[in-house]
Image (cartoon, helix red, strand yellow):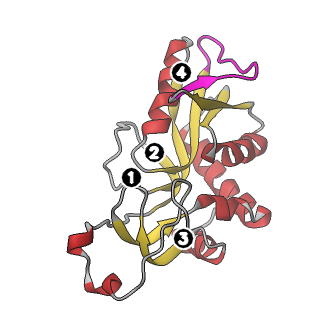
Amino acid sequence: MLSYDESLKILKETNALLEGHFILSSGLHSDKYIQCAKLLSHTKEAQMICSSLCEKIKNNFKEIDLILTPAIGGIVVGFEIGRQLNIETIFAERIDKELLLRRGFNISQNSKVLIVEDVITTGKSALECNSLVKRNGAVTVGYSCIIDRSNNKSKITDKIISQVKIDIETYESSNLPDKIKKIDPIKPGSRNLQK
């Protein structure tokens, strides 16, 4: 199993964890930015991180029938976790602002479902997946992700099994710390265009 420091090193080397001055999609500023897709584009490193996460999953969840991920961020990590654990993996897609099962995917009644994400921040998508599980008469056994950056502010009340937990401070533009004031900000992310 990879240590926290070994995992952090991989995230930095693959540019999944960046340091500098970032304007987040929320409009808040930060000195760190996570883009887990960068890790997942490096197959060897992603396999190592997911293998370590699989060990944690096996230690915490004794029985899993299905893995459910939200599209789009969770698909690749969910697939790799499912492949390594030999568990069927499906994903939910957002249609008209609601996560739904499509493509013939279904959740069997009474099945035990693990919800897997790349990154958990607020937990919104994971909790929407949980609602899908409940609507299908199944049970969510827990939540897992590569990076937990919820800072204990997630609406998920269950324990989140993650490979790395990172607390990232955010700041209003009127209250920037000196360490990032002098750095030109960039706007990364799926909802922003990069400068």
Circle 2: residue type: Ile
Magenta highlight: main SS: loop
Q: As displayed, is residue 190 above or below residue 111?
A: below
Image coordinates of residue 58 in percent, x first then y, are 62, 43
Q: Which residue is mark 3?
A: 17
Mark 1 and mark 4 residues within 8 Å of each other at the beta carbon: no
Of all residues, the one furthest to the bottom in this rendering is 182
Callout 3 touching callout 2 (CB < 8 Å): no
Of 12 and 88, the residue lying toward us: 12
Tag 1 residue: 150
Report, in whole angstroms, how far the alpha carbon at label 2 lies from the one at label 1: 10 Å
Tell me where the magenta segment starts and ends, as one range. Answer: 98-111
Q: Earlier in the sequence, mark 2 or mark 1?
A: 1
Secondary structure category for the residue under label 2: strand
* Left or right: 66, with 151 as reference point: right
The reply to whether callout 3 and callout 4 are in contact (CB within 8 Å) is no
| Earlier residue among tags 3 and 4 | 3
For label 3, the SS is strand
Q: Which residue is tagged 2?
A: 160
Q: Does the magenta run of residues contain 101?
A: yes
The mark nearer the N terminus, 2 or 4, is: 4
Quarter where residue 83 is shown: top right
Disc 3 packing (10 Å; few <14; some 14–19; many ≥20): some
Q: Position of residue 32 (x, y in %)?
A: 44, 72
- The x and y percentages for residue 77 are 67, 48
Alpha-carbon span between mark 1 and mark 4:
22 Å
Residue shown at the point (42%, 62%) measured from the top left: 24
Q: Nearer the viewer, mark 2 or mark 4?
A: 4
Of all residues, the one furthest to the left in this rendering is 175
- Kindly identify the amino acid type of the residue bearing the numbered disc 4: Leu
Q: Earlier in the sequence, mark 1 or mark 4?
A: 4
Asked if marks 2 and 1 touch (Cβ < 8 Å), the reply is yes
